[in-house]
Amino acid sequence: MTPRTKIAAFMVALAAVIALGATALLGIEPARAAEAAAAASDLPPGVLQWGFLAAALATGMSSLAAGYAVAMVGSAAIGALAEKPELLGRVLILVGLAEGIAIYGLIISILILNRLV
């Protein structure tokens, strides 16, 4: 196995472990969170569960998308910097824009949670 293949296999295994852990938490924690929030809120429990799920999905999916975008932009940026080092400022802006996707998802989930509680 080449070192690159080993790293790819490790990353896939790590992603699988994280996905299994997140799936387990999504099965257990929304029920507990809904019970705790139902005591402090006038909304029906079903609305709270869907709201918590929406907030989790907004953050999770935007973080995955940001990771993918940074990977694509970052690899292209390294190639561009190898040929023209004076492009550093422009490349940093592009990578920062790709990271902004995760921040937008976090803002949306905060807005959803503020509306629920």
Image (cartoon, grey):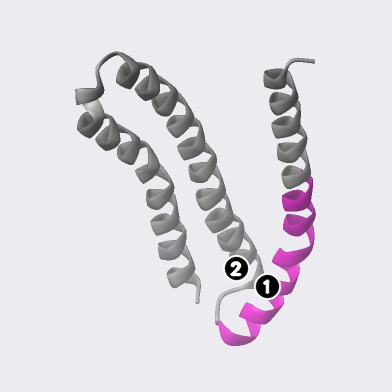
* Amino acid type of the residue that numbered disc 2 sits on in the rendered structure: Leu
Q: How many marks?
A: 2
Q: Which residues are magenta?
A: 20-41
* Label 2 Cα crowd, 10 Å radius (few <14 / some 14-19 / many 20+): many
Is 77 or 63 nearer to us in this picture? 77
Image position of 92 (left or right of 21): left
> Can residue 32 be found in the magenta stretch?
yes
At mark 1, the secondary structure is: helix
Measuring 76% from the left and 49% from the top, which residue is drawn there? 23
Query: In the orientation shown, which residue stands out farthest toward the bottom?
Result: 40
Measuring 51% from the left and 52% from the top, which residue is drawn there? 59
At mark 2, the secondary structure is: helix
Dividing the picture into quadrants, the one containing residue 78 is top left
- From the viewer's perspective, is the residue at label 2 or at label 1 nearer? 1
What residue is disc 2 on? 48
Q: Which percent across, then down, holds residue 107?
A: 39, 58
What residue is disc 1 on? 33
Dot 2 or dot 1: first in sequence order is: 1
Measuring 32% from the left and 17% from the top, which residue is drawn there? 80
